[in-house]
Image (cartoon, coloured by chain):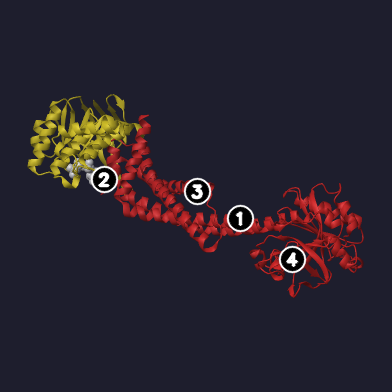
Amino acid sequence: MIQMQAIHKSYWRGGAELPVIRGIDLNISAGEFVAIMGPSGSGKSTLMNIIGCLDLADRGEYRLNGERVSGVQFSRLAELRGQTIGFVFQSFNLIANRSALENVALPLLYQGVARDERLDLATQALQRVGMLDRASHQPNQLSGGQQQRVAIARALVNRPSLLIADEPTGALDSRNGDQVLQLFNELHNEGHTLVMVTHDPLIGERADRVIMLHDGVVI
Amino acid sequence: MNRLRVFIELTGEAVIALWQNRLRSLLSVLGIAIGIAAVMTVSAVSSGGKLFVLKELETFGLRSLWVFRDYQDKNPQSRIRDSSGIDSRDLSLLKGACCPAVKRLSPVLLAANRPIVQNGNRYSSAQLKGVDANYTGINNDRLTMGRGFRPADIKGRRPVVLIGETVSQDLYPQSENPVDRDLRIGGRRYQVIGVLEYKSRDLLASIGSEGGEDANNRILLPYTLVQQMNGNQQVSYLQAEAVSIAKAEQAADQLRLTLQRRYRGSYQYTKITLASYLKTVDRILGGITAMGVVAASTALLVGGIGVAGIMSTAVVERIREIGVRMAIGANRRHILFQFLAEAVLISLLGGIAGLLFGFLLGGSLDLLTGFPLMPTLSGVLTGLIVSVLVGLASGYYPARRAAGFLPVEALRRE
Ligand SMILES: Nc1ncnc2c1ncn2[C@@H]1O[C@H](COP(=O)(O)OP(=O)(O)OP(=O)(O)O)[C@@H](O)[C@H]1O
Ligand SMILES: [Mg+2]
C-alpha cells in the first residue's frame, strides 16, 4: 500500500537547511497496523504528513496504492486525502460551531455526495464510534475523548483504505486514551490499514510492526 | 453534476460562516450598502435632473430653432443699417425648396413700441408678439380654451389674439371666460380667440435665460397686424421647427445661408437651436454626474476595502479550519470558492440593501423637492453587477491567500 524510497525533507530556518527526514525507506502493506515511535523532534509528524499527503517530500519516491504521489497535481493530492486517506490528529481538529454530525459529514461534501446521503453515512460513522447520541453536540460540548471519537468517525466516513493517526491519544487522559486505542484496534481488526505515531510502548506492542525514528532516519 | 453540487454546497458553507459572524458581516454589508446607495442616488439625481431640464426645454419644442440678423456684424457699413434684415418677401422663399430640413416656419415680430393693453380699467403689461398660424405648433404652445390662429386670420389681418395665463388674470375677472371677449391694444379693439396653457420655466427664468420675461405674460397676434402697427414689412426674427432634433443645426443653416446669399454684403445672420442647448445640458450634467460618481465610488471603494479587510481577518482566524478542510479533501479551488463566495455574498447583500436604501432616499428626495429621481432597471442591474464585482475584487486576494497554503502549513498555525 505504501512504498517509500529515500524520502528526504528539510526545513529552512534563517537560510540554514534543517534536515528532518534524512532518507527513509518504508513499505507498509494493506491491512497492517504500524506504530511509529521515536523521541520528540525525530521527524514522526513530518513523516506522517508526507504519508497523509498533507505535505510533500523534497526528494525520494512515495507511492500510494502504486500511484506516484510526488509530482502529482495539488488537486489530485486533495482527492487522495478525501478518498483514500483518513487522518486523525492529536488535537482533534474539529470545526468549531458545527455539530458532531456536520463535522463527520463534511468530507463527503467535497466528494459531491448529496446532503441526505451525507447525513446517512455520517450517522453510520458516528454509530460506529459510539457517538450517535452526541450527534447534535458541538465540539466544545464534548470531552476530549468524545471529540477524538468524532474525529475518527470523520476520518472513517469516506471509507478510506488508509487510516493515519498522529498521537491520537496524546491529548487524552488514560481512560479516554484507552477507549480511543480500543477503537483503533477494532478498526484494524476490521481490515483497515493503520499507521499511528505514539509514545506509548504498550500500543507499540499491539501493532504488527514498530518503526523507530531517530533524527530523521529509521533505526 | 457532482462537481457542481460541491460548489452549490460550498455556497451554503459560506452562508453559514457569514451567519456565525453576523455582526461583523452586517457591518461590512453596511459599508457596501452605503457605497451602492451613493452611486445609485448620484445616477438617479443626474438622470432625474436631466429629465427636469428637458421638460422645461420641451416648452419651446425640442426641435425649435431661431434665425435672426447678426447685429455684431464686423462690416461697419452694414452695422449701421437699421433693419432686422428679414421681411415678408423672404418668407415665401424660405418656406420653399431652399430648406428641406425645415418642417415649418413662423415669422416673429416684436412691437416697436409698447402700446397700452387694457380691458376697461384693467391693464396688462404683456409683451406683444406677432406670429403666424404655425407658431404655436412650433413653440409647443397648447390652448386651455378657444382656438388658435388660422391662415385666414393672418392673411386677412383679423384683429384676433391669443393671450397668456397672466394676461387673462390681469384683464378678466376669475369667473369670466375670456374667449370671444374684447381687449384694446393701443386703443384698437381685438377679440380674444384662445388662452395659452401655463408654461413653467422656473429653472430657465431663474438662470436668466428667459431674460426675465414671463412666458405667461404675452399676447400673440397676427404678424401682419404688428407690421401694420410698426409701419413696415420687417420681421424681427424667424422661429422654425426642424424635421428632427438631429437635423436642427442643418435646418437653421439652410435658413441662415439662404438669407445670407440673398442679402450678400448687406447683412449677416446667426442662429440658435434648442438642440445645442440639449448638448450643453448633457455636458454640464455629465460633469456634475462624473464628480458625484467619483465621490460615490470612493464610498464604494471604502466599502470594498472593508470587505477585503474582513475577509483577510477571516482567513487568518480560520486558517486552521482551512487546513482541516484541506486535510479532509478540499482542494484549492474549493477553498478559493468558499471565501470568494463569502465576499460576494456580503457585497451582494450590501448591493441589495444599498438599492433599497437608494430607492427610499430617492423617493423621499422626490417628495421633498419635487425633483423627479429616476431609478432605472439598468441602474438596478448595474448596481447588482457592480456589487458582485466589488465582492470578487475585494475577496480575491484573501481567498487566494487562503487557498495558497499547504495543508500542513495551515494546520500548524494556532
Ligand atoms: N515548519 C517547521 N519549520 C521548521 N522546523 C520545523 C517545522 N516543523 C517541524 N520542524 C522541525 O522538524 C523537526 C521534526 O519535527 P516533527 O514535528 O516531525 O517531530 P516529531 O517527531 O513529531 O516530534 P513530537 O514527538 O514532539 O511531535 C523538529 O526539530 C522541528 O523543530
Ligand atoms: Mg509530532
> Does residue A67 appear left or right of residue B71 in this picture?
left
The percent coordinates of residue B363 (x first, y second) are: 49, 57
Q: Earlier in the sequence, mark 4 or mark 3?
A: 4
**Which residue corresponds to mark 3?**
B380
* Amino acid on which disc 3 is placed: Val
Mark 1 burial class by Cα count in 10 Å: few <14, some 14-19, many 20+: some
Mark 4 Cα shell of 10 Å, populated few (<14), some (14-19), many (≥20): many
Label drawn at residue B218: 4
Q: Is residue A14 visible?
A: no
Q: Please name the amino acid that badge 4 sits on.
A: Arg
Where, quadrant-wise, is the N terminus of chain A in this rendering? top left
- Number of the label disc, if any, that sits on residue A181: none
Whether discs 4 and 1 lie on one chain: the answer is yes
The chain coloured red is B
Give residue B51's mark: 1
Relative to A61, say whether B197 is above or below: below
Q: Quadrant of residue A20?
A: top left
Q: Of circles 2 and 4, which is in front?
A: 4
**Marking on residue B412:** 2
Callout 2 amino acid: Arg
Q: Tell which subunit mark 1 falls on.
A: B
